[in-house]
Image: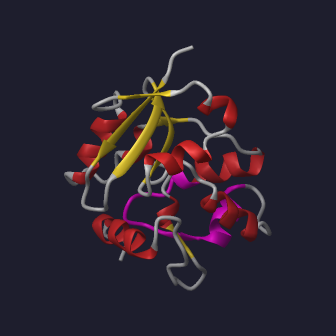
């Protein structure tokens, strides 16, 4: 059984931590590598981890993003565990153009369940592949920023960088 690769990259938004199998991204975020490992499904985490300097394609896309190619995050292949609604919500998030935001209500609609605004929020909260699945682009109806698992300052930084605010 091949160990999963881990890598870290500094960025204008804080250190980004990555876990992948080859070029398939399984987890990313700004808190810590240990946080991501704890949040992985047990059947995935049991494989163990091996430090890498970079993750094929994923690291290149991230560096390009930080250099101003704000449209590239959706190029990354990813996989995460979740039910049908969450899968639809995560896919819908990847279709939000950089520099744009949508509301939780819009996300519920784009995910096929217009009344599922709370479930849309849960899909954001359980997203293990931020910012590649850009839950930072989801805001409250009326434009208030709402929350972000990696803190509001990080969400604001990402949205300003992308030109959304």
Identify which residue is drawn at 54% across, 42% down: 37
Identify which residue is drawn at 53% across, 27% down: 48
Asked if residue 63 can be seen in this view, the reply is yes
Viewer-nearest residue: 132 or 72: 132
Q: How many marks?
A: 0
Identify which residue is drawn at 66% across, 58% down: 123
Task: Tell me the magenta residue range.
Answer: 93-111
Would you say 89 lies left or right of 112 here?
Answer: left
Would you say 43 lies left or right of 103 here?
Answer: right
Viewer-nearest residue: 18 or 104: 18
Would you say 64 lies left or right of 144 here?
Answer: left
How did the renderer colour the structure? secondary structure
Asked if residue 129 can be seen in this view, the reply is no
Q: Position of residue 160 (x, y in %)?
A: 31, 72
The quarter of the picture where the C terminus appears is bottom left
Q: Position of residue 32 (x, y in %)?
A: 43, 52
Identify which residue is drawn at 74% across, 69% down: 118
The quarter of the picture where the N terminus appears is top right
Up-down relation of residue 14 to residue 49 (above or below): below
Residue closest to the far left: 67
Viewer-nearest residue: 76 or 127: 127
Residue closest to the far top: 1
Q: Position of residue 133 (x, y in %)?
A: 50, 50
Examine the structure image and report whether residue 101 is included in the region drawn in magenta.
Answer: yes
Q: Position of residue 74 (x, y in %)?
A: 44, 44
Examine the structure image and report whether residue 139 is included in the region drawn in magenta.
Answer: no
Where on the picture, by quarter, is residue 121?
Answer: bottom right
């Amino acid at each position: 059984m091949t160990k999963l690769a881990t890598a870290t990259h500094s960025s204008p938004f804080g250190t980004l931590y990555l876990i992948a199998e080859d070029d398939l991204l399984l987890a990313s975020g700004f808190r810590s590598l240990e946080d991501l490992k704890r949040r992985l499904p047990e059947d995935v985490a049991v494989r163990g981890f091996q430090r890498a300097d970079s993750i094929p394609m994923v690291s290149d896309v991230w560096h390009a993003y930080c250099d101003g190619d704000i449209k590239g995050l959706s190029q990354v292949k990813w996989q995460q565990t979740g039910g049908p609604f969450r899968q639809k919500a995560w896919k819908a998030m990847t279709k939000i153009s950089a520099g744009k935001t949508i509301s939780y209500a819009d996300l519920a609609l784009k995910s096929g369940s217009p009344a599922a605004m709370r479930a849309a929020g849960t899909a954001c909260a359980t997203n293990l592949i931020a910012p590649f699945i850009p839950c930072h682009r989801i805001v409250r109806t009326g434009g208030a920023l709402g929350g972000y698992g990696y803190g509001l300052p990080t969400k604001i930084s990402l949205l300003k960088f992308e030109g959304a605010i």
